[in-house]
Image (spheres, grey):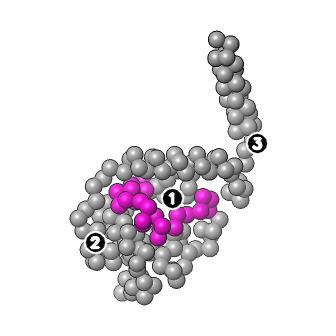
Amino acid sequence: MRFLAFIGALAILGAIAAAIYLFGGFFSVAENVDNPAIVDWALASIRGASVAGHATDKAPANLDDPETVKAGAKIYSTIGCVNCHGGPPDANWAKWSEGLKPVPADLKVMAKERTAPQLFWVIRNGIKFTGMPSFGLAGASDQDIWSIVAFIKKLPSISDDDYKTWTASP
């Protein structure tokens, strides 16, 4: 019984210490200060579990259609995705995106690690505490978002020349 009381007292002291640290202004919310490793780990773990748990939309059959991929490239470049995430190797990232923490995801990697429904969910809903906006709230249609997903899934194999051609103004 004493052992359980000791564990309970430690838990209460830990909660008080965390509250003092967080609400007492000791935790820096400055973007140019790195988080403690445990904070980054916790946020990444929670983010991954949340995306996996909420991404339930079924991908449309046309994700491999070349016209859908081309349309996705055009939308990707015009709504600003390229500013934070870049594109094929020569696509320009916006200089200000270098100041974002966490660093915007490399979508050439995410194309392999995430399913199409997971990418759709993130683009449509955004991610809190990352700078990733909700393009659904910003007015992008589900069809446009699925086109972007089609483009991202093909991104690792898209050449600079193809991307430039697909995103050039008419």
In the image, which disc is placed on residue 64?
Answer: 2
Name the residue: 66% across, 22% down.
Answer: 7
In the image, which disc is placed on residue 91?
Answer: none
Inspect the image, locate mark 3, and give the three-letter code of the amino acid beneath it.
Phe
Q: Secondary structure at mark 3?
A: loop
Looking at the image, is mark 1 or mark 2 nearer the viewer?
Answer: 2
Mark 1 surroundings within 10 Å by alpha-carbon count, few (fewer than 14), some (14 through 19), many (20 or more):
some
In the picture of the structure, the residue carrying the numbered disc 1 is: 132
Regarding residue 155, the answer to whether it shows in the image is: yes
- Between discs 1 and 3, the one toward the N terminus: 3
Q: Quadrant of residue 22?
A: top right
Q: Secondary structure at mark 2?
A: helix
Q: Quadrant of the C terminus?
A: bottom left
Name the residue: 57% across, 48% down.
Answer: 43
**Rendered view: 129 above or below 76:** above
Q: CA distance from mark 3 to mark 2?
A: 50 Å
Percent x, y of residue 78: 43, 74
Q: What span is in magenta? A: 100-125
- Between discs 3 and 2, the one toward the N terminus: 3
Q: Main secondary structure of the magenta part?
A: helix
Name the residue: 32% across, 64% down.
Answer: 146
Report if residue 110 lies within the magenta region. yes
In the image, which disc is placed on residue 26?
Answer: 3
Percent x, y of residue 101: 62, 59
| Count of picture labels | 3
- Foreground pick, 52 / 33: 52
**Rendered view: 94 above or below 168:** above
- Foreground pick, 33 / 134: 33
Regarding residue 164, the answer to whether it shows in the image is: no
Inspect the image, locate mark 2, and give the three-letter code of the amino acid beneath it.
Asp
Inspect the image, locate mark 1, and give the three-letter code of the amino acid beneath it.
Met
Looking at the image, is mark 3 or mark 2 nearer the viewer?
Answer: 2
